[in-house]
Structure formats: C-alpha cells, structure tokens
Image: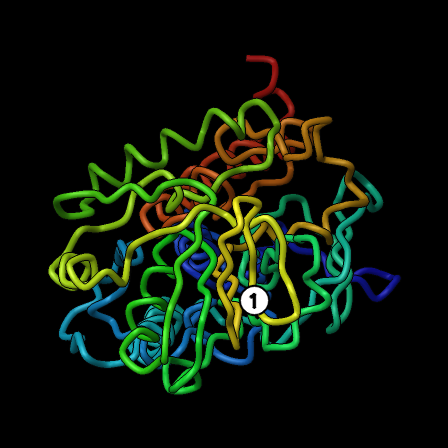
C-alpha cells in the first residue's frame, strides 16, 4: 500500500464469472500470486457469476453451450438440477482448487488514469493502483429494455429475463414473449404449459440450428462477432449468431404451434399490443427476453469508446489503452470464448509488464 492508502498490484480482474475466473487461472499459471500481484473483485454475493441469478427452471440439461473452465472439468452434474446450483458449486470448487481468493461483494465504481502510468480502480473496499486491468463484467447487470410507443400505458405486468421467476408465476395468464434468443424460446415453452395463452414476437425470423453446439461451432460463432468489435461497433451477442438449437423439446413445441412467431408489433396499448395491419393481441404480461448490454460504464473515464459506440479491440486489448483487456466482451462473450480470451489477455499483460520492467525489451 502506498502513502495515499491505495494498494498497488500488477493486475486487477473485475468480475468472477467464467471470463474473470479464466483470467485469474492464467495469471496464476503465469506466476502471479493472488492478493500480492493481482486481485479478483466480484460484486456478486457468492461464486457462480451470472449463473447464480438464473431462474430455477433453467436446469443444467437446458444450458446452451456451457464449456468447462480451464484446468478443471465439470463432471457428474445431474441434468435435472438447476443450473444456478450446478455452476455455482462448480465455480466455488474451482476458486478453492486454484486458490483464487475472490474479493466479494465488491462494487467497482470507476477506473481512471492514476499516477506513474497506473490505472486507479475505485471500489467499495478501497482503491487499487494497477499496471493492467482485465475487465470481465459481462452483461447480466444491464438488461436491455426496448422502447415502444404506448409502453407506459400497458396496465398489465412487464418484466425482463433478468427478473424471470419461472413459469408458475404466469399460470392462467395471457403472456406475450418478446425476443428470438435462447432465453425467449425457453421461457415461452415453459410458460405455454401453464398459461391461458402465449404469443411469441421477434424482430427477425428465428433461425433453428441442427446438430450439437460443440467447440468448432463455438469458434465459428465467435469469429462472426469479431468483425464488429474490430470496427469499434457495439458487439452482438455470440448467441445471436449461433441460431437456436433444434432439439426434441423445440420440435414438439413447434408441432404444437407454441413457436409460431409473429413479427414485431407496432405499439402497445392498455390491454395488449397491436400491429398497423389491424392485428391485435390482448395480454396480462409482456415478458421482454431482449438480451443484455455490456457493463462497461465504470470504464468511461478512460474514454475507450469509438465513434461507433463500442470499444475497439486488438484481440482482448483495448486499442485506445493497451493496459486494459476486455474478456467476456463481444467475441469472447461465451464460455468457450471467455476461456480462450483469458489466456490471451494474460499473455499480452505479461508482455506489457515484462517490457516495463526491462525497457530494453521494447527496443528489440
């Protein structure tokens, strides 16, 4: 700790989901000691990343494309157990196995330029001066709510995937599910079993994908997102380009008409939604399964955003500041992508720190 009560470390990792734990694991493998050379800060109350907040009916068997953390497989998990329990226990065991010593709950407030070329990370447990940063804050804390004419007049209930309580809360109700991603289809299929009526609305026609979501498929999906990040545009989610898995449950739901999709409505009324062609659907609930946006507001003082609205990356490194690495952002916002990005970020950070310690290396 320096004379100003700010603790000096080589690396701060913000977030302890899949991306943050991957980065922490590779830091340990590279010889960095937790709580001496690096710290991992997590605002969640316990291990599990965003998975701990998932609804109970999202069982492990329904999880879309989950890959194990580096160095430790997830084995023996029962498909019928809630994913929040399975992955929470797995992350807990992982942190213990590799001695990652995550600080929680800790809120990171801002990251700004500090003294002597370091970044100053202001948090609820004090400030850290760091030579490099791995930002692995994900998206769960920033649900995206689209805005539509008449939305404020709706007399029923509106909620987002982030607040989804499970299907029982919709028994006997008329429910509109908005969103064409994996969460939207899972919500819809569950709710249709107990609701009086369901309607599925998506902005684009859904695309269903045959076959398993294996590592090759994951890498292909990651590659499709990378170009937007290279251009400094806000990233699309990896899930948005993988398509929806066409499994037996989805086939059955399609056969029953549950997944008959309507195009986006034009406005919301007191009692439902309407289209300009005169179609109308009455509803008690509108469930917005419309995804999330990256949690990067704490990085605003560093001015990393491009005119297009996103942060341009070279690999995981922010083009505007080589000290900052974003893992779990854009092309690495999947479990397999996060694993690869954690390794890449640590490799680049080690090169940066070695260069600072031995300036002559930068001349070679």
Residue 321 in the figure: left or right of residue 73: right
Q: 75 or 85: nearer the eye?
A: 85
Q: 62 or 290: nearer the eye?
A: 290
Residue 240 in the figure: left or right of residue 314: left
Point 20% across, 69% down: residue: 61
Residue projecting furthest to the front:
278
Give the answer, above or below, for where 154 lies relative to 315: below
Residue on which the image places disc 1: 272
State the image coordinates of residue 39 (x, y, percent, origin top left): 58, 62
How many neighbours does mark 1 have within 10 angstroms: few (below 14), some (14-19), or many (20 or more)? Answer: many
Point 59% across, 77% down: residue: 157
Q: Report whether residue 37 is seen.
A: no
Give the answer, above or below, for where 297 lies relative to 197: above
| Number of residue marks | 1
Q: Quadrant of the C terminus?
A: top right
State the image coordinates of residue 150 (x, y, percent, origin top left): 70, 59
Q: 288 or 173: nearer the eye?
A: 173
Judging from the image, the colouring scheme is: rainbow
State the image coordinates of residue 272 (x, y, percent, origin top left): 56, 66
Point 72% across, 47% down: residue: 299
Q: Report whether residue 155 is seen.
A: yes
Give the answer, above or below, for where 33 lies relative to 58: above
Helix, strand or loop at mark 1: strand
Q: Quadrant of the N terminus?
A: bottom right
Point 73% across, 73% down: residue: 125
């Amino acid at each position: 700790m320096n004379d100003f009560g700010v603790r000096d470390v080589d690396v701060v990792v913000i977030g302890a989901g899949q991306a943050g734990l991957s980065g922490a694991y590779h830091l340990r493998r590279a010889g960095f000691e937790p709580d001496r050379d690096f710290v991992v800060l997590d605002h969640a109350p316990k291990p599990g990343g965003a998975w701990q907040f998932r609804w109970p009916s999202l069982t492990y068997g329904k999880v879309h494309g989950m890959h194990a953390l580096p160095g430790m497989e997830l084995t023996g998990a029962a498909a019928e157990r809630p994913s929040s329990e399975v992955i929470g226990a797995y992350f807990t065991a992982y942190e213990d196995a590799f001695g990652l010593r995550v600080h929680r709950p800790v809120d990171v407030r801002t990251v700004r330029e500090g003294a002597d070329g370091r970044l100053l990370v202001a948090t609820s447990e004090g400030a850290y001066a760091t030579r490099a940063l791995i930002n692995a804050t994900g998206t769960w804390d920033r649900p995206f709510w689209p805005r539509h004419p008449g939305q404020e007049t709706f007399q029923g209930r509106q909620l987002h995937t982030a607040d989804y309580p499970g299907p029982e809360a919709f028994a006997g109700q008329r429910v509109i599910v908005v969103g064409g991603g994996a969460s939207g289809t899972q919500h819809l299929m569950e709710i249709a079993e107990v609701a009086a009526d369901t309607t599925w609305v998506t902005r684009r026609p859904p695309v269903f994908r045959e076959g398993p979501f294996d590592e090759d498929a994951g890498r292909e999906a990651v590659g499709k997102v990378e170009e937007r990040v290279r251009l400094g545009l806000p990233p699309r989610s990896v899930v948005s380009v993988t398509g929806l898995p066409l499994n037996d449950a989805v086939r059955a739901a399609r056969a029953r008409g549950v997944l008959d999709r309507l195009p986006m409505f034009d406005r919301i009324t007191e009692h439902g939604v309407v289209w300009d062609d005169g179609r109308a659907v009455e509803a008690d609930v509108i469930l917005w399964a419309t995804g999330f946006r990256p949690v990067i507001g704490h990085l605003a003082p560093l001015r990393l955003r491009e005119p297009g609205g996103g942060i341009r990356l070279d690999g995981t490194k922010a083009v505007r500041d080589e000290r900052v690495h974003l893992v779990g952002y854009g092309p690495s916002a999947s479990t397999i992508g996060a694993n690869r990005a954690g390794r890449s970020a640590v490799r680049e950070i080690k090169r940066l720190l070695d260069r600072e310690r031995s300036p002559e290396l930068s001349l070679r």
